[in-house]
Amino acid sequence: MTPGFQHRRAASLPSRAIGRIAPDILKALFKSHGFAQGQILSAWPAIAGDELARFTAPEKIRWPRRGQGARAGQDAALATLVLRVEGPVAIEVQHSTPQLIERINGFFGYAAIGRIQIVQGPLPRRPASQKRPLRPLSRREEDKLRSHLGHVDDERLRKALMRLGRGVMGSR
């Protein structure tokens, strides 16, 4: 083969964005750990709350085999979330298990998880965030944001939208 032939061959292959093929590649990996979708991993801080998510990480979801849950006196359709917990937070997680199961099932939109198995141990270290700090908004920008959200009656929703607006406007 001549070097020119290799070049022509490589040039004829279609290029694809990694964002388009990554879900297909990762799907098999997630499925091997019981995650039908990898969304629970990326949404974990929103599901568990930022404070709890710093010390916990979903490891896998163990789905019961057909008929296995019924013999144990449980609903056969409910799965077990294996949750890695760092340090003494395990006691807090154990006490808040019912609320955590409710939040996870709310994320899925149906009763998927019936039990949480806690595995105590160190979490993989996450890389330090490369985010730029948000710039403070000018008085004019704050006033504009407030005027856009003045019609929102729900106080909690208005505060959440204000934080979102500050984050969007402050990142530009």
Image (tube, grey):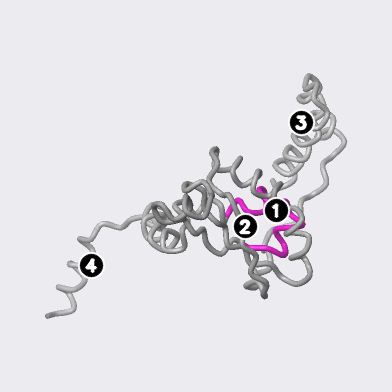
Residue 84 is situated, as x and y percent measured from the top left of the image, at 63, 67
Residue that label 2 marks:
116
Residue that label 1 marks:
97
- Distance Cα–Cα, label 3 vs label 2: 31 Å
Q: Earlier in the sequence, mark 1 or mark 4?
A: 4
Residue that label 4 marks:
10
**Front label number (3 vs 2):** 2
- Distance Cα–Cα, label 1 vs label 3: 26 Å
SS assignment at label 2: strand
Q: Is residue 85 left or right of residue 78?
A: right
SS assignment at label 4: helix
Q: Earlier in the sequence, mark 4 or mark 2?
A: 4
- Distance Cα–Cα, label 1 vs label 2: 7 Å
Q: Is residue 43 part of the magenta span, yes or no? A: yes
Q: Is residue 139 left or right of residue 157?
A: right
Residue reaching furthest right? Answer: 139
**Front label number (1 vs 4):** 1
SS assignment at label 1: helix
